[in-house]
Amino acid sequence: MDTSSGCHVELHLPNRPEFVAVARLAVSALACRMSFDIDAIEDIKVAVGEACTNAIEHGCPAEPGVQVIVVCCDLKDEGLEITVKDPGEGFDPATAARQHRQGTAVLTERGLGMLLIESLMDEVQFDSMPGNGTQVRMLKRVRVLETTESS
Amino acid sequence: MSNAINLDVQKKCVDAHTAIVTLSGEMDMYTSPQAKEAMLELLAQGYYHLVVNLQGTEYLDSTALGVLVGTLKRVREQGGDLRLAAPTPRVRRLLEITRLINVFPIDATEQEATAKFQQEGNES
């Protein structure tokens, strides 16, 4: 049994690029305390990195280091739930989703972050209202390994 | 906070048009500008055949992929190309998810990638 289940951890980080590594390393350290395999931990690292990068790029671009992004981690029996919040201008999730579904049909330098988050995590929910910030909630489920008992 | 500890960028010129960029460490929003600057410098010097060695790239995100795509576009505009060498299984997976695996030529080793460029040069 995972004794960390039920714990809530919050990181408040300056909106500066060098702190993205801090977020992903802290969250991956939490994931290591759960029953994730190495591949799942790497998936979580990338997803958290992408969510924080989006928060810094689009959520609070005006004053680097002044505004704060919040990374909340809830360690649950079913898995690790991570929410990344920014205080920025928000966006229309439907438009962004449409853009990223178009993917690399047109060779693009941007817009790959959301595609990675949705591909690497089990559940993803974007909540954003223009003028009211953005919140990305992601869940990575712990896989239960099937064991064969010998008789 | 120095970004040197997170990403090491090495450049090596092979011939008049071919160069190798070796990226070791973590390539993200903070460190990717280092790699971009190195590749733009090579382009400015006329190196349009670039091999990017990813053997030591432990972490790579969408910003890094964006830098590679941007550089690929620029070298192709000049008649060149950008080949990725020795991506780790982890990096390869991200290339598959983003479908960039179909965009970049990928080789198992740096030597294989440079040999392909030299072969193309001899054929043209």
Image (tube, grey):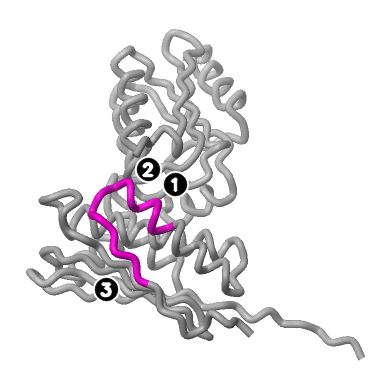
Q: Check chain identity for marks 1 and 2: say if they share one.
A: yes
SS for dot 2? helix
Which mark, residue A126? Answer: 3
Residue A12 counted in the magenta span:
yes
Residue A144 counted in the magenta span:
no
> In the image shown, does A63 or B82 lie closer to the viewer?
A63
Q: Which residue is mark 2?
A: B64
Chain letter of disc 2 in the image:
B
Q: Amino acid at mark 3?
A: Phe
SS for dot 1? strand
State how far apart marks 2 and 3 are (Cα).
23 Å
Q: Marks 1 and 2: CB-CB under 8 Å?
A: yes
Chain letter of disc 1 in the image:
B
Q: Which residue is mark 1?
A: B60
Where does the magenta region start and end?
A10-24
Instruction: Name the quarter where the C terminus of chain A is drawn.
Output: bottom right
Instruction: Name the quarter where the N terminus of chain A is drawn.
Output: bottom right
- Residue located 53% across and 44% down the image: B58
- Residue located 11% across and 72% down the image: A132
Q: Is disc 3 surrounded by few (<14), some (14 to 19) or many (20+) residues within 10 Å? A: some
In the picture as drawn, the residue positioned furthest to the top comes out as B16
Q: Is residue B18 above or below residue B99?
A: above
Chain letter of disc 3 in the image:
A
Q: Is residue A54 above or below residue A2?
A: above
